[in-house]
Amino acid sequence: MKNVMKAGLAKINITPRIGVELTGFGPYLHRYPIAVRDNLWAKAFAVEQAGKRVVIVSCDLLGLQTPMIDRIKAAVKKETGLAEEDIMVHCTHTHSGPATSEMNGWGEIDPPYLEILPHKIAKACIDAVNNLQEAKLSHAEVPCEGIGVNRVYDKVYDKDPSTLEHHLSGNWRPAKPELTDTACHVIKIESRGKTIGFLAYFGCHPVVCCEHSHYIHGDFPGVALNNLEREFPGSVGLFLQGAQGDVNTCVAHKTEQEALLALDVIAARFANAVRNGLIQAKPLKVGQINSAIIPTNFTEDKFKISELEKTLADKERAVRKADASDADFTVRMEMVYITAYRKIISLLKDGKSTYPMTKIQGLQIGPIALLGSPFETFQAIKNDVKTAAKSPIPLVMSFTNDYLGYATDKQSRGGYAGQTVPLIQARLPLKKIHEELVEVLLELEKKLTGK
């Protein structure tokens, strides 16, 4: 019985109190929730085969940074004995949850919430390991359409004046579906003839509810999987966020009433796809479980300190005008840049990088390779990895082990995601992130599989 596969699942409520600030969408918006639309969860899945155990936890949060990840992993290691590479901490990237990272104006963190959070996430992992029981896995790749649109390359969508009803109609599709995910992967976990859990992998920004929304929830994946859990009482469903850096939901930046209507429709579309996957899933032979981490530094662009100081001085003058108002969006945005440029200049003067060394992590579960990085990864990067990978089912995941902004493709280096976002996060743009991330993810896969 030594080689019998075991699986365990657990979840813990990580919904914050109403008083915390929600994150995303603009500088100093002070977007506070008025109610909980759907609870936020840390959901964990542990698996064991031939004495090797790993655990992955998926959190309904925008992202978590390295100090928090380290605290979670240390707590799990202390209770379970699992090594760092055996514990994967992942986020779904909901924009309808609390600020959990230093985002420089994109939502203030709440110290009491953040002090409690790592212990809760760790408990989900520990409980999943303690719940290990004989189980079997099944897998399906099923169509998942009518959700995402490529916000960078689908220019038809950008100029589309279509009504909300059009996007919520059952036959809506983006002009270029090939630039999005059109299928999702579903992994079903069964024990004693009962579905005890499932994992759903798909790449799309959870931004149905945007800057005008004031409700807490996990956006379309959170709502969908919470509903599916009710269909399978006692089950735990994890969402694994894929390559979503250039993919938005078909409805975004609408009024609160329109967004909440769209949330239910798009969540239902995703739930239908996952449900079909649970029905169609075929047994998965888990011959081997493995884990690996590759510490990595990515190449930053070179900026002259003198040029940064000149830009900083210009922005400081703009906010020091006699008629400047803190209610002015332009002033608030300039303050984001001022804060960021001061930090960047200080780091460069000390000879330091603006990026910490990050850890690219992977888990192998039989034919499935979960390849995680801390970026909002563009579709083209995922496609390059998928084409070159040796694993039968390579799944490129975002928001794993840290949150470092976008990993843009070669064509998008100078745009909003590649140039603007790093600077407002107090980092320099990454010079070769497409090539370097593909390379390290393939190296990681080789380390996992030996192929």
Image (tube, rainbow, N blue to C red):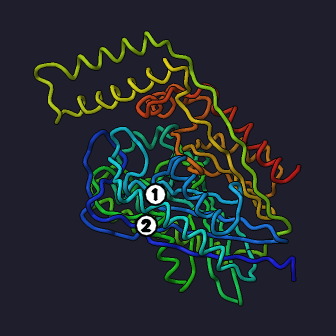
Residue ID at (34%, 63%):
216
Name the residue type under label 1.
Answer: Leu
Mark 2 lies on residue:
14
Residue ID at (33%, 49%):
253
Crowding around mark 2 (Cα neighbors within 10 Å: few <14, some 14 to 19, many 20+) is many
* SS at circle 1: loop
The residue at the far front in this view is 78
In terms of image quadrants, where is residue 46? bottom right
Residue 370 image point, x, y percent: 70, 56
Which badge, 1 or 2, comes first in the chain's sequence? 2
Query: Which marked residue is nearer to the observer: mark 1 or mark 2?
Result: 2
Report the front residue among 29 and 344.
Answer: 344
Contact flag, marks 1 and 2 (Cβ < 8 Å): yes
Residue ID at (57%, 43%):
375
* SS at circle 2: loop
Name the residue type under label 2.
Answer: Ile
Report the front residue among 121 and 22.
Answer: 121
- Left or right of residue 368, residue 129 in this image: left
Mark 1 lies on residue:
61
Report the front residue among 41 and 128.
Answer: 128
Residue 241 image point, x, y percent: 57, 56
The residue at the far left in this view is 323
- The CA span between labels 1 and 2 is 9 Å
Residue 226 image point, x, y percent: 48, 74
Number of labelled discs?
A: 2
In terms of image quadrants, where is residue 310? top left
Regarding residue 273, the answer to whether it shows in the image is no
Residue ID at (67%, 75%):
188
Indicate which disc residue 339 carries.
Answer: none
